[in-house]
Amino acid sequence: MIARFLQRAIEEGADFIETDILASKDGVLICHHDVFLDDTTNIADHKEFADRKRTCMVQGVNTTGFFVGKFPIITFEEYISIALDAQRVVGIYPEMKNPVFINQHVKWADGKKFEDKFVDTLKKYGYKGAYMSKEWLKQPIFIQSFAPTSLVYISNKTDSPKIFLIDDVDILTEDTNQSYSEITSDPYLNYIKEYCVGIGPWKDTVVPVANNYSQMPTDLVARAHALDLQVHPYTYRNEHEFLHFNFLQDPYGEYDYWINKIGVDGLFTDFPGSLHNYQELTSPVSKDHRASKLLHKIAVLISSNGKV
């Protein structure tokens, strides 16, 4: 199913396709949002799997559920192939998901870590090069993670651009137990810029929300830009419950606000078709193209009828 969703995103004009990367118990890198299956499958309804339910520590919290194992889920390599097989250049934006948990519970025979296997897979398919380099433009990629130590670790293994993801204001980093205020401080941003080209914060921390109304924006984007860090917030959705009242249930209004007023450099959306349409509608090139087509139609009418 996820493969079809990714292909649909490409069809709708996505510049990059994003996914979370985990590892199964037998060491295969797979695409899945959580280390457990409860929220995204109906596994709890299958009594034959009842004995597989267990409790593990995930990001400092005891979590009970059905954890990822040997189930038919798309692999990291299959995800990469979807991008490479597209009829145009499509970037990938994979996340190293829950690396602390993965390294605690999955062991590889060669002694490598999850992060090593992640980078090895990217190199196998030719992903390399600094941001906007010749190699990067041929096969664009951003590597993302909420775990800063993982990003620092792979900085010596790949020059592909990295994005430091930032969670909600009350959630500590999974590997360093740092608070939101610590990792968004100027000294920390100045530190992380040595390893990353940007940050990926949850959008409701950049522009706080009260009673479903967007409030005054913080200065996070401005401070990040002052340090030459890009800002790619997440996640933009069309459903009414995710669109704040300020935008009158109009996703185009939300995109316009974030791109033109807040000034973000990129964004994550579950509806790439809507964002692509917004870009088409607001692009000067698109407007000129539509005007040219209209003029051409008028010229055809004049030449065929002698009058308009």
Image (cartoon, rainbow, N blue to C red):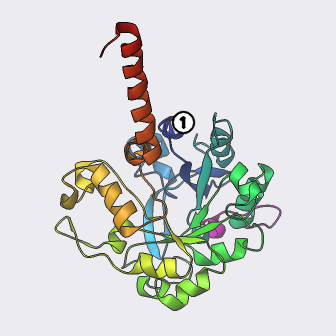
For image coordinates 62% across by 49% down, the residue present is 91
Q: Position of residue 141 (x, y in %)?
A: 64, 56
Decide which of 298, 174 is in the foreground and name it: 298
Region of the chain picked out in magenta, as a range: 102-113
Most distant residue in the right direction? 110
Decide which of 149, 90 is in the foreground and name it: 90
Q: Which residue is mark 1?
A: 7
Tell me the quarter of the picture where residue 111 sits.
bottom right
- Judge whether residue 210 can be spotted in this image: yes
Q: Position of residue 272 (x, y in %)?
A: 44, 45
Relative to 14, residue 201 above or below: below
Q: Say which amino acid is labelled 1.
A: Gln
Q: Secondary structure at mark 1?
A: helix
Chief secondary structure of the magenta span? loop
Q: Position of residue 57 (x, y in %)?
A: 50, 71
Most distant residue in the top direction? 305
In the rendered structure, does residue 110 fall within the stretch colored magenta? Answer: yes
- Judge whether residue 46 can be spotted in this image: no
Relative to 218, residue 128 above or below: above
Query: Residue 304 vs residue 142: left or right?
Result: left
For image coordinates 38% across by 27% down, the residue present is 294
For image coordinates 77% across by 74% down, the residue present is 156
Query: Residue 260 vs residue 34: left or right?
Result: left
